[in-house]
Image (cartoon, helix red, strand yellow):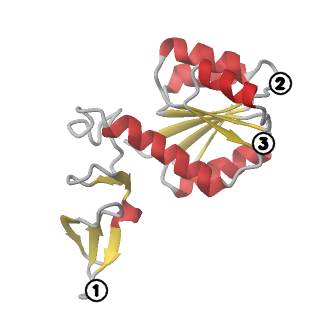
Amino acid sequence: MSTAGAKAPGNFNVLVIEDDANIARLVEANLQKAKLECRHAPNGRDGLIAFAQREPHLVLLDLMLPDTNGYEVCAKIRQRSGVPIIMMTARTQTEDQLHGLKVGADDYVTKPFDPQLLVARVVAQLRRVHRYDASAEQKAGEAGGAPSNWSTCHDCGYMGPNEKFEELSETFRLTMVCPHCNTRLKQELLPA
């Protein structure tokens, strides 16, 4: 089991359970660009151990693992947690996808996949889970709340990395604007 990326308190963390090291590195690199902390486990056993130790905010789970299958890992995680689970697999049959969703997966991505689309799905799942958590705003910055480098629009509830909200004004000041509803957030930042 290996840990990748810098640890930042309050960040969302994602557990990537994937036996192909090249795919795991690709996924981790793209998630880190979105300011998400990643941990990689190369098999189901290590994935379950990492899940118990870290209790991540989201799990990306390969279906075909060397020691077990992703369905079993998904079912075991689902017994103890409602964390979002996205299955990643080369299996494209409808039956495989239906089975994955029945055992508790929230989404199903087939390989090969576009890394940007995968990151968008991860962010959407995190936003969905935390947007409707009434206490998330109170817990911002604490474990379980939105990470400190994410912003939330108080008008529409959109949540995402600060970079998505940053916009340069006509006076060359960095301002925060919701990319979803174009509401200007009250904070105004000085250029770096």
| Residue 176 makes an appearance in the image | yes
What residue lies at 48% left-to-right and 53% top-to-bottom? 35
Residue named by callout 2: 66
The amino acid type of the residue labelled 1 equals: Phe
Disc assigned to residue 172: 1
Residue drawn where x is 78% and y is 42% of the image:
21
Residue 188, quarter of the rendered image: bottom left
Q: Using the image, tell me which numbered label, if any, was put on residue 96.
A: none
Where residue 123 sits in the image (x, y, percent)? 48, 47
Residue 80 placement (x, y as % from top left): 49, 13
Residue flagged by tag 2: what amino acid is it?
Pro
Is 118 situated above or below 82? below
What's the distance in space between the residues labelled 2 and 3, CA to CA?
13 Å
Residue 61 location in percent, x, y? 66, 31
Q: Residue at x 27, y 49 (%)?
A: 157
Q: Are marks 1 and 3 in contact (CB under 8 Å)?
A: no
Vertical placement of 67 versus 61: above or below? above
Picture coordinates of residue 181, whole percent (x, y): 29, 62
> Residues under labels 1 and 3: Cα distance?
43 Å
Q: Quadrant of the C terminus?
A: bottom left
Q: Which residue is mark 3?
A: 21
**Label located before the other in sequence (1 or 3):** 3
